[in-house]
Image (cartoon, rainbow, N blue to C red):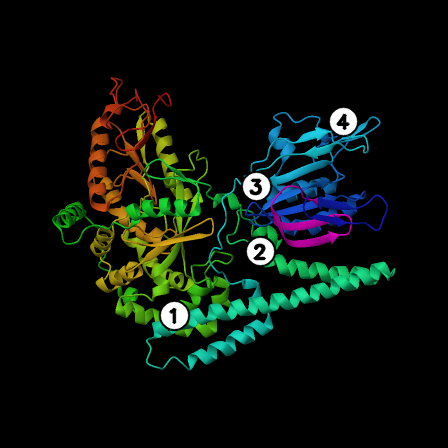
């Protein structure tokens, strides 16, 4: 037998219990939300954190909803969840044998609550056509009011119902594998932003910071001083959080003892309710930092818990396949697979001095030499290279997104926003000094690399099927956003009008409308065209730095500003952070970092020469204006090109090869219905000006998806 936990009710026929048998379990926390009605247990089973919530729903709809409201905050956690018991209500009309009765407001609230928390009903999950499954029987009355909820990504066997002689409820049981989820590491420290609203915390930091300012003139550079201050700030907030947590927990234990005395002595119900409210307030505050997840979810709600929803499954990696085909499941093995993959992808920049480097430089020069850019004699680049101002730093800090994961230093955007007036002048000095020296402080050069799952991917063991995101320190993001804002004001003038990403006044909807209008005009004009949608592999990660710097200079950006952009990447390092485990650092020598404010705009510059080469070619396109037919539409790396015949497809193919050779981009290769080579996918049909696609699908050479429309629709 193992540990047992009981919650006895004051009324008759009440009470719940959680018992363990033959399982390695350690209890981390016990919370009794309502005596005899709900208990929350945080435990570790098989090295995995688990939250168990046992419920016995009240008879009254109003009381049930009140209990659900108390439970709701505890559903938002990175731990796995088992939420089950006798809910005393249904979630569907079919859960009663007589399905004519409508759902009550408590049932609607329960459905919404578990859905937004990413939980699924185990019975409904395993039953294709869910009918029956009644857990409660009394005479002719049958209903399904007992159930288990789990996170949808957790493997749980189908539930089993077993009738017993001592109750009118069946036993509801199911098996779960608590060892299937990979073990979690400690992750990286992160400031609990909830501390920042405490007056004593604000006062403590301001006093601390004023003390640190006295050390700024002791022979250190401003960057060295800033690195020291950040390290000491981490220790300060770590100690403040620990002391406040200890103080609050002592207060909670005192309230718990007082509540026991009041109940045992038959105290005033109002006094009992007041103590319970204080305890609930404490628990809410205690769990707020755990409930508020690192990233905003897609759902928005006034409730702070719902606004910070995150599905842990998108970041948990159970196993990865190495280059030799071995499936790695241990933290060390998974980190090695990630490191090997990203050393190959990000750690090999273009050679600089060798014969190969000379050859690559020649390919870059050849590709860009064919590029014709419009004259912008009235365009001034002076603002790009002026010194960074306090006003720019302040604006950038205030524009940082809240509830986002910070970088390795753990200091959040909320921290910088809370103390903006105090920090902005010093950050301004650090930024100007670093840009003048051509090197950022060490902490600004370091990032954590996390992997997010892509939708509808079957082979999750392939590390290439996970999307890399760089968690950059907020001070580095503040600087990047300032540079982005400066160049963004000029981007509309210097970049192609066919690009719709990261350019003020243009959106993805404009790009979609352009393509749609082209197809409509084609149909109206009885003329067939085809769209080649380029699918590039790891487009942001493969951008060659030497090529990118050459493009920025080609587009007229001052050398000083280009050097500032280079400074953002000089000496950049990253370490993998997978399942909370930290890997060894990787030197970043190619790509633009996904997670950096300026990266989308840098990528748009990198791909713009290719777009302009397509525009300047001989493609017929679709008439949009007499002087400018529509030939290409782009939103970042999503590029659609209009072609009309074999010759045009071959022309695009040649441009892709030249662009890939210069920029190190790679168009995906797929095997599919298309024959080898782009041009072989087209066959001219003697039907006037119309073309018809005889064979279409994925082109195995260039990863091009072709879709067509003609007088009679798709071929």
**In screen coordinates, is 10 left or right of 215?**
right
Dot 1 lies on which element?
Answer: helix
Q: Earlier in the sequence, mark 3 or mark 1?
A: 3
* Figure quadrant of residue 531: top left
Q: Is residue 499 above or below residue 268?
A: above
Q: Magenta span covers which residues?
A: 19-43
In this rendering, the label closer to the viewer, 2 or 3: 3
Mark 1, other Cα within 10 Å: few <14 / some 14–19 / many ≥20: some
Label annotation for residue 97: 4
* Whole-number angstrom distance, CA of label 4 to CA of label 2: 41 Å
Identified at 36% across, 48% down, the residue is 501
Numbered circles on residues, count: 4
**In screen coordinates, is 18 left or right of 577?**
right
Q: Earlier in the sequence, mark 4 or mark 3?
A: 4
119 in the magenta segment: no
Q: Position of residue 100 (x, y in %)?
A: 76, 28
Q: Where is residue 543 in the image (x, y as percent from the top left)?
A: 28, 48
Identified at 72% across, 60% down, the residue is 279
Asked if the residue under mark 2 is in contact with the one under mark 4, i.e. CB atoms within 8 Å, the reply is no
């Amino acid at each position: 037998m193992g540990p047992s936990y009981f919650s006895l009710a004051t009324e008759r026929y009440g009470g719940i219990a959680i018992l363990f048998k033959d399982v390695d379990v350690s209890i981390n926390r016990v919370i009794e939300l309502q005596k005899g009605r709900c208990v929350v247990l945080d435990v570790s089973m098989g090295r995995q954190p688990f939250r168990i919530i046992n419920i016995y729903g009240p008879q009254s709809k109003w009381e049930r909803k009140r209990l659900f409201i108390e439970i709701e905050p505890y559903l938002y956690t990175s731990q796995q969840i088992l939420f089950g018991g006798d809910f005393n209500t249904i979630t569907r009309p079919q859960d009663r044998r007589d399905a004519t009765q409508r759902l009550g407001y408590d049932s609607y609230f329960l459905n919404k609550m578990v859905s937004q928390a990413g939980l699924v009903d185990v019975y409904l999950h395993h039953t294709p056509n869910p009918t029956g499954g009644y857990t409660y029987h009394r005479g002719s009355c049958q209903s399904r009011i007992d159930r288990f909820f789990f996170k949808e990504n957790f493997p749980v066997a189908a539930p089993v119902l077993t009738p017993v002689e001592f109750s009118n409820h069946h036993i509801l049981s199911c098996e779960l594998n608590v060892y299937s989820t990979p073990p979690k590491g400690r992750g990286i420290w992160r400031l609990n932003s909830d501390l920042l609203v405490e007056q004593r915390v604000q006062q403590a930091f301001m006093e601390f910071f004023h003390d640190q300012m006295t050390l700024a003139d002791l022979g250190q550079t401003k960057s060295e001083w800033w690195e020291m201050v950040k390290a000491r700030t981490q220790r300060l907030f770590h100690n403040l959080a620990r002391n406040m947590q200890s103080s609050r927990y002592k207060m909670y234990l005192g309230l718990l003892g007082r509540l026991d005395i009041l109940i045992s002595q038959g105290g005033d119900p109002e006094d009992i309710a007041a103590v319970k409210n204080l305890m609930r307030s404490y628990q809410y505050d205690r769990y707020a930092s755990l409930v508020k997840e690192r990233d905003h979810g897609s759902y928005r709600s006034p409730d702070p818990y719902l606004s910070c929803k995150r599905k842990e499954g998108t970041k948990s990696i159970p196993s990865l396949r190495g280059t030799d085909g071995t499936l790695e499941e241990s933290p060390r093995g998974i980190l090695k697979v990630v490191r090997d993959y990203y050393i190959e992808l990000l750690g090999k920049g273009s050679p600089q001095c060798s014969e190969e480097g000379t050859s690559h430089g020649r390919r870059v020069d050849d590709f860009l030499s064919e590029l014709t850019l419009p004259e912008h004699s009235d365009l001034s680049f002076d603002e790009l290279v002026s010194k960074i101002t306090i006003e720019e730093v302040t604006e950038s800090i205030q524009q940082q997104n809240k509830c986002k994961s910070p970088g390795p230093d753990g200091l959040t955007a909320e921290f910088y926003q809370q103390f903006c007036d105090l920090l902005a002048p010093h950050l301004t000095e650090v930024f100007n000094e670093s840009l003048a020296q051509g090197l950022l402080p060490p902490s600004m050069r370091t990032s954590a690399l996390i992997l997010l799952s892509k939708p509808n991917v079957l082979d999750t063991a392939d590390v290439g099927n996970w999307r890399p995101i760089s968690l950059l320190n907020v001070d580095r993001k503040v600087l990047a956003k300032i540079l982005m804002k400066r160049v963004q004001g000029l981007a509309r003038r210097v970049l192609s009008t066919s690009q719709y990403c990261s350019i003020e006044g243009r959106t993805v909807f404009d790009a979609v409308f352009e393509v749609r209008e082209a197809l409509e005009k084609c149909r109206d004009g009885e003329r067939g065209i085809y769209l080649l949608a380029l699918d590039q592999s790891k487009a942001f990660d493969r951008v060659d730095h030497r090529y990118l710097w050459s493009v920025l200079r080609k587009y007229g950006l001052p050398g000083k500003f280009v050097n500032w952009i280079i400074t953002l990447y000089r000496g950049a390092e990253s370490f993998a952070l997978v399942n909370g485990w930290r890997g060894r650092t990787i030197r970043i020598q190619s790509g633009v970092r996904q997670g950096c404010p300026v990266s989308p705009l840098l990528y748009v510059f990198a791909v713009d020469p290719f777009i302009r080469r397509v525009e300047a070619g001989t493609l017929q396109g679709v008439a949009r204006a007499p002087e400018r037919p529509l030939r290409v539409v782009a939103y970042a790396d999503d590029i659609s090109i209009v072609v009309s015949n074999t010759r045009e497809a071959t022309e695009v193919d040649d441009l892709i090869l030249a662009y890939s050779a210069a920029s190190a981009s790679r168009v995906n290769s797929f095997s599919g219905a298309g024959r080898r080579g782009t041009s072989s996918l087209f066959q001219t049909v003697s039907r006037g000006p119309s073309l018809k696609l005889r064979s279409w699908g994925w082109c195995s050479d260039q990863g091009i998806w072709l879709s067509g429309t003609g007088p009679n629709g798709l071929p």
